[in-house]
Image: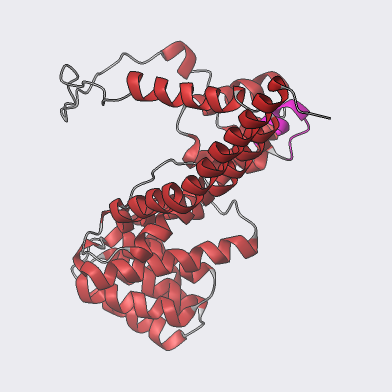
Amino acid sequence: MTMGREEFFFLIILAVNFMVSLLYLLAGIILIVPARASLADEEETEVFYDNRRTYVIRFVEMILCPVIVPLFFLMGHLFYLFVFWRDANLADVVFSKERVKTNQKADEESERNIIPLEEALLVNEKKDLRSVFVNVMREDIRNSLASLALALDSEDSETSHYAAAVLSDELNKFRIFVQKQLIQIRGKKHSDTESEEILLDYMDSILKQHVFSEQEQHKYVNEMKEVAALLYEKDASRITLERYEAVCLRILERKDFESVEKWCLRMEEHYPEELSTYTCKLKLYFARQDRKRFFETLDALKRSDVVIDRETLELIRIFSTRRR
């Protein structure tokens, strides 16, 4: 049985299609993917590119649908080259660093009816609770995660559902951001400290609300301590008094007294005559039940010229009375 002309041409088309598909697969796996991955590592930026699995899937599609799929990929690539071949012209776009502060008149009518989310939960009125929840959602909810965690136990199923969704979303954002920043910080060799400072402040703003499980809280406190140590090695002057206090308090919550004492000494070295320096040491010695050093620090605070706030003054009064 002899082969007809149409069958002969059909086999040639299949053979050419197979060769083109194979060349496309090999070029993608061997040349394109490694080249773009290397470019991403060199520029230390995220470069979007197709991975090896994508080329394998396309190879299978080109084999199963000869001619049509290769032409589709070719036309798509040509369209990309001719339409998006140059960067957008941003000459007319102005990025100004100036910020204008707008003073808006307070809405006294609505402000008069606002109550804290915690009070709404205690009252447990669905109307008030949902209204407060909507107001919280309109603002920066990063500082309201602890209140949202309380709303999980609300008898109003709609409120607890929304609270769980919002809280889960924010915690996932925290996990992704911390992981991404830690990878960048650990791989950086230069002396720039901006990433460490941003991450340290961000982690403290979330961790001090205690919205994670005990195990996860412990993990992130250790990572926060690592970030602080890296910042201290690069430029200790970039650790402000507030950052020292945040690191000490977060570690103290884990009862890692040795690490807390190390950071308290560093804090005392850079900020010797500050109220936070004394209060952090007092909290450490109180938690460790070191009576001698606690009263030594308390006496040193009373002899110093540090301006004492009402809370610390009350603490001095109470413990001075007990000492007698």
Q: Residue at 32% across / 58% down in the picture?
A: 196
Residue at point 33%, 20% (across, down) = 82
Outermost residue on the bottom side: it is: 292
Inspect this view and state whether residue 73 appears: yes
* Quadrant containing the C terminus in the rendered view: bottom left
Q: Nearer the viewer, residue 92 or 139?
A: 92
The answer to whether residue 21 is left or right of residue 84 is right
7 relative position to 234: left or right: right
Residue 203, image x and y in percent?
44, 54
Figure coloring: secondary structure
> Which of the two residues, 46 or 140, is positioned nearer the viewer here?
46
The image shows residue 215 at horizontal and vertical percentages of 63, 65
Farthest residue in the right direction? 1
Can residue 201 be seen here? The reply is no
Q: Specify the segment rendered in magenta.
A: 153-163
Q: Which residue is pictured at 32% across the width and 60% down the height?
A: 243
